[in-house]
Image (tube, coloured by chain):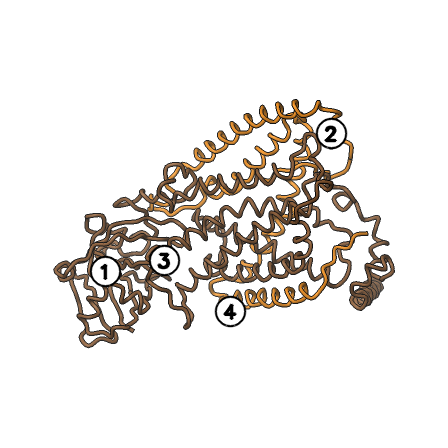
Chain colours: A orange, B brown
C-alpha cells in the first residue's frame, strides 16, 4: 500500500506557519464581525467546499461518464477538449449571464448583452472543436489504424468517471 | 442508556486507537496493518464502495503530474492575487508603516487590473485542479496517521477558501450579492485563511510536486489511450479556457481589447462623458445637495486660515489639465482628461504644513466611502486635483459635480466625488 502521508521537517514547519496564518484570518474575521458577519461567512465558506465536492464535481463526473460513451473514439479527444473549454468559460460567465446582479439606475454597470456574449464564445469554441475533429481524426489515421475499442467501457461501477469536463 | 454506554465505549476505543496511531507516527504505515488505526480501516474495508473503490476513477488524467502542473500555475495565480490584494487593502486602510506613493501614476491601475484579471483566469485552473485531484477525496485509508489526518483537515479551508475567494470576487464584479457580509472584508480575511491553508498544502506536497514536475524519461511516458484526451491536450484546453476568459474580460481595463471583450463587466468608453460610473448621485443621496448654489468647498482643520470656496471661486483659480485614469477596485479603468485646482495650491492658500495629510469628505451623508485620505505624498503631488471639468465639460453629476478629487495612483473609491470639505490632519 502506497503511503499518502506527508512527513518531514518541511511539512511540519509549513503546517505550523500555515495554521498561524490561517488562524490570523479566523481571528480577523471575528474581530471584524460587523462587516464579515461570521455565521453567514462560515456558511458561504464551508458551502463553497461542500457544493463543489458534493454537488458540482459528482454532477460533472456523472455527466462525463454518461456522455463519453456516446462519442465515437475518433473525434472524442477534440470533443472532450471543446467541452472542457466551453464548461470552464461558461462557469466564469454565469454571474454575468444570469443577470441577477447590477446597479439600478447605473447604465454604465454591466453594459453588455452577456447571454449574446457567451453565445458568441460558444460558437467560436464549437468551430474550433469541429476543426479539431478533422485534424485529430486525420492525424490518427496517418499514425496508426485504430485497433480495438478503448478500455473505457469495461468497468461497471458508480460513479465510474472516466473522462473529463467541468461545469 | 445502554446505547450511550456503547457509544461512549466506541468513542473511547477510537480515541485510544488515534492516540496509539499518533504514537506510532510514520512507522505505523511502514509496518502496514499493524497499527490499531490501520487495523480499523482493514475492518472497514467492506465500506469501500462506489468512488471509494480502487480504480473507480479511470481517466489517466488524474495523475500527480497533471495536479502538480496545474497546482504550480494556480500557486502563481494565488500569489499574484494575494500580493495585489494586500496592496489594495493597504492603500485603503494603511498601517502606520505603509506609505503608498503617488507615482507611478498608473501603478494601482496595473496592480488592481492584475488582481482581477488573474483571479478570473485562475477560475478555470482551480476547477481543473479540483477535477484532477477529486479521486483523492476518496483516498483509502481516509486517515493513515496524525500527519495525514491533519493534512487532510487543512484541505477543507483550502478548497472552501479557494472556491469562496474566486466565486465571491467574480460575483463582486458582476455586482451580485446573494450574501449578508460586506464583500471587501470577507474577501480579505478569507484570503488569509486560504493562504494559510495553501502554505500547509505546499509543505505537504513539496516533495511529490518536485518529483512530479521532473521531466520524465522516455521509458516512463505512456501515450494517452485511444479516444482519451492526453495530458497536454487537457492542460492545453485549460490554458485555452483561461485565455478565452482573459480576452473576454480584460478590455474593461485594457482599451485595445474593448471591442472583443464581450463579457467585460464594464466598458471603459460607456458612461456619462465617455467613461463608467460606480456610485450614482441618486444612490449617494446627493441629487439636490450637489446642485445647490449654496455649495461650498471648505478647507479647514490644521490650517492658518480656513477657506470656504464657491464653485466660481474655484473656477477663478489657476486650472491644471491632466490625463489620469479612474482605476476601480473592481478591475476596470478608464482614462479621462481632468481640469481643476491642485490640492496643494489650496493647502498653500490655507497655510497648511507642506507635509500635511488631508481627509477629503463628500457631501453624501452616509456610506463607507464618503471620506478618503490623502497621505502626504498624494496631498503634495501637483497632479492631485480638485477636478471641476472632465473631457472638456463641467463634471456630470454622476462623476461628482460640482467638484471631485482626482489624483495619480489611487483606487477609484478614494477619488472622492461631490467633495464638500478638505480637512487638514
Gap in angstroms between the C-alphas marked 3 and 1: 16 Å
Gap in angstroms between the C-alphas marked 4 and 3: 25 Å
Residue A24 falls left or right of residue B349: right
Q: Closer to the camera: disc 1 or disc 4?
A: 1
| Labels 1 and 2 within one chain | no
Q: Where does residue B12 sit, x and y in percent of width and height?
A: 81, 67
- The tag on residue A31 is 4
Please state the total of marks drawn on the protein image: 4
- The tag on residue A150 is 2
Q: Closer to the camera: disc 2 or disc 4?
A: 2
Q: Where, quadrant-wise, is the C terminus of chain A in this rendering?
A: top right
Closer to the camera in the image, B217 or A49: B217
Q: Which residue is mark 1?
A: B386
Q: Where does residue B141 sit, x and y in percent of width and height?
A: 78, 53
- The answer to whether any part of residue B8 appears in the image is no
* Above or below B209: residue B295: below
Residue B35 falls left or right of residue B267: right
At mark 1, the secondary structure is strand
- Dot 2 falls on which chain? A
Gap in angstroms between the C-alphas marked 2 and 4: 57 Å
| Of callouts 2 and 4, the N-terminal one | 4
Image point (70%, 50%), residue name: B137
- The tag on residue B411 is 3
Residue B146 falls left or right of residue B315: right
- The answer to whether any part of residue B249 appears in the image is yes
Quarter of the image for residue B296 reads: bottom left
| Labels 3 and 1 within one chain | yes
Residue B36 falls left or right of residue B391: right
Q: Contact, CB < 8 Å: mark 2 with mark 3?
A: no
Closer to the camera in the image, B49 or B69: B69
Q: Where does residue B304 sit, x and y in percent of width and height?
A: 19, 77
Amino acid at each position: 500500500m502506497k503511503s499518502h502521508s506527508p512527513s518531514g521537517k518541511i511539512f511540519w514547519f509549513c503546517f505550523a506557519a500555515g495554521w498561524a496564518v490561517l488562524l490570523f484570518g479566523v481571528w480577523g474575521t471575528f474581530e471584524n464581525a460587523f462587516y464579515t458577519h461570521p455565521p453567514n461567512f462560515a456558511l458561504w465558506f464551508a458551502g463553497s467546499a461542500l457544493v463543489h465536492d458534493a454537488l458540482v464535481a459528482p454532477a460533472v463526473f456523472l455527466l462525463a461518464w454518461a456522455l463519453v460513451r456516446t462519442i465515437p473514439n475518433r473525434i472524442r479527444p477534440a470533443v472532450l477538449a471543446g467541452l472542457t473549454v466551453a464548461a470552464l468559460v461558461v462557469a466564469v460567465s454565469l454571474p454575468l449571464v444570469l443577470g441577477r446582479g447590477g446597479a439600478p439606475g447605473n447604465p454604465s454597470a454591466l453594459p453588455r448583452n452577456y447571454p449574446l456574449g457567451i453565445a458568441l464564445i460558444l460558437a467560436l469554441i464549437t468551430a474550433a472543436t469541429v476543426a479539431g475533429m478533422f485534424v485529430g481524426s486525420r492525424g490518427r489515421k496517418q499514425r496508426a489504424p485504430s485497433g480495438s475499442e478503448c478500455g473505457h467501457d469495461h468497468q461497471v461501477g458508480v460513479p465510474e468517471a472516466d473522462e473529463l469536463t467541468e461545469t | 442508556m445502554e446505547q450511550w454506554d456503547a457509544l461512549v465505549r466506541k468513542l473511547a476505543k477510537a480515541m485510544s486507537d488515534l492516540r496509539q496511531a499518533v504514537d506510532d507516527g510514520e512507522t505505523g504505515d511502514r509496518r502496514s496493518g499493524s497499527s490499531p488505526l490501520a487495523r480499523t480501516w482493514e475492518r472497514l474495508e467492506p465500506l469501500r464502495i462506489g468512488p471509494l473503490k480502487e480504480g473507480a476513477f479511470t481517466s489517466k488524467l488524474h495523475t500527480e503530474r497533471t495536479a502538480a502542473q496545474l497546482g504550480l500555475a494556480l500557486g502563481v495565480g494565488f500569489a499574484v492575487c494575494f500580493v495585489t490584494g494586500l496592496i489594495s487593502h493597504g492603500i485603503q486602510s494603511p498601517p502606520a508603516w505603509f506609505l503608498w506613493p503617488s507615482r507611478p501614476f498608473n501603478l494601482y491601475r496595473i496592480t488592481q487590473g492584475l488582481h482581477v484579471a488573474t483571479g478570473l483566469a485562475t477560475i478555470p485552473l482551480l476547477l481543473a485542479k479540483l477535477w484532477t485531484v477529486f479521486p483523492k477525496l476518496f483516498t483509502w485509508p481516509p486517515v493513515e496517521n496524525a500527519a495525514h489526518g491533519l493534512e487532510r483537515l487543512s484541505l477543507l479551508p483550502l478548497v472552501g477558501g479557494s472556491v469562496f475567494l474566486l466565486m465571491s470576487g467574480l460575483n463582486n464584479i458582476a455586482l451580485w450579492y446573494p450574501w449578508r457580509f460586506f464583500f471587501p472584508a470577507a474577501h480579505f480575511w478569507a484570503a488569509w485563511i486560504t493562504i494559510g491553508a495553501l502554505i500547509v498544502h505546499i509543505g505537504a506536497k513539496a516533495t511529490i510536486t518536485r518529483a512530479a514536475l521532473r521531466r520524465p524519461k522516455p521509458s516512463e511516458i505512456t501515450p494517452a489511450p485511444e479516444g482519451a484526451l492526453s495530458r497536454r491536450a487537457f492542460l492545453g484546453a485549460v490554458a485555452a479556457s483561461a485565455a478565452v476568459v482573459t480576452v473576454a474580460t480584460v478590455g474593461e481595463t485594457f482599451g485595445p481589447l474593448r471591442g472583443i471583450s464581450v463579457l467585460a463587466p464594464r466598458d471603459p468608453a460607456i458612461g456619462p462623458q465617455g467613461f463608467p460610473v460606480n456610485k450614482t448621485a441618486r444612490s449617494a443621496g446627493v441629487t439636490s445637495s450637489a446642485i445647490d448654489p449654496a455649495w461650498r468647498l471648505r478647507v479647514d482643520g490644521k490650517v492658518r486660515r480656513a477657506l470656504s470656496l464657491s464653485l466660481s471661486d474655484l473656477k477663478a483659480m489657476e486650472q491644471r489639465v491632466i490625463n489620469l485614469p479612474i482605476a476601480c477596485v473592481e478591475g476596470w479603468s478608464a482614462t479621462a482628461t481632468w481640469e481643476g485646482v491642485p490640492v496643494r495650491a489650496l493647502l498653500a492658500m490655507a497655510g497648511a504644513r507642506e507635509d500635511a495629510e488631508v481627509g477629503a469628505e463628500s457631501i453624501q451623508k452616509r456610506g463607507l466611502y464618503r471620506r478618503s485620505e490623502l497621505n502626504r505624498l498624494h496631498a503634495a503631488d501637483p497632479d492631485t486635483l480638485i477636478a471641476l471639468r472632465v473631457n472638456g465639460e463641467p463634471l456630470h453629476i454622476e462623476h461628482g459635480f460640482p467638484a471631485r478629487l482626482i489624483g495619480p495612483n489611487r483606487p477609484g473609491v478614494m477619488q472622492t466625488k461631490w467633495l464638500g470639505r478638505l480637512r487638514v490632519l
